[in-house]
Image (spheres, grey):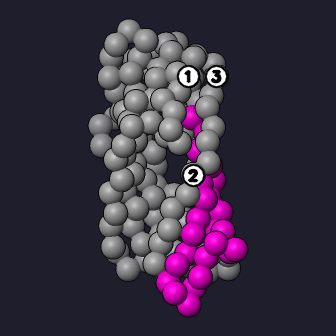
Amino acid sequence: MSSEPASEEYKIRISVESAYLDTESDPDDERFVFSYTVTIENLGNTAAQLLNRHWIIIDGNGREQEVKGEGVVGEQPLIEPGTGYQYTSGTMLETPVGIMQGSYQMQGSDGLLFDAEIKPFTLAIPRVLH
């Protein structure tokens, strides 16, 4: 993963909250469904548009899935300085615990392309981890 430019022009903060979707899951069939809500904040001085996403999803057995694509939830939001963008999506695992991480390819209003890192976060059914 490439890192953010050192300049204060481009400063993107990403936070993620995940939740287990009990009603959509079927543990007996090794189907564990999770939602995750991502908040992207532009703390820099330049507007930035989210162009592409790159996710790495690793289940409790170490099985890795890679997901790449345009935008998020069908959008390529332009995030102005001092504002944010939030969306909710989901994923399915074959184990009750997993990890997701990745990056968003962003483009500053000046045309510069850069990656905003999404730090690893845990997907886990309640009471599995201490």
In the structure shown, which secondary structural element does the residue marked by tag 2 occupy? Answer: strand
Distance from the alpha carbon under mark 3 to that under mark 2: 20 Å
Q: Is residue 7 left or right of residue 76?
A: left
Q: Is residue 43 left or right of residue 53?
A: right
Question: Mark 1 — residue?
Answer: 79
Q: Nearer the viewer, residue 4 or 73?
A: 73
Query: In this picture, is 69 found above or below 94?
Result: above
Q: Are marks 1 and 3 in contact (CB under 8 Å)?
A: yes
Distance from the alpha carbon under mark 1 to that under mark 2: 19 Å
Question: For the view shown, which residue lies furthest in the left direction?
Answer: 2
Q: Please say whether residue 27 is one of the residues in the magenta stretch.
A: yes
- Asked whether residue 12 is in view, the answer is no
Question: For the view shown, which residue lies furthest in the top direction?
Answer: 110
Dot label at residue 89: 2
Dot label at residue 19: none
**Residue depicted at 45% across the width and 58% down the height:** 100
Q: In this rendering, which labeled residue sits more in front, label 1 or label 2?
A: 2
In magenta, the rendered stretch is 17-40
Q: Nearer the viewer, residue 10 or 92?
A: 92
Q: Measured from the top left, where is residue 33 in percent x and y?
A: 57, 69
Q: Amino acid at mark 1?
A: Ile
Q: Measured from the top left, where is residue 109 in percent x and y?
A: 43, 12
Q: Amino acid at mark 2?
A: Ser
**Residue depicted at 57% across the width and 51% down the height:** 89
**Residue depicted at 39% across the width and 67% down the height:** 58
Quarter occupied by the C terminus: bottom right
Q: Amino acid at mark 3?
A: Thr
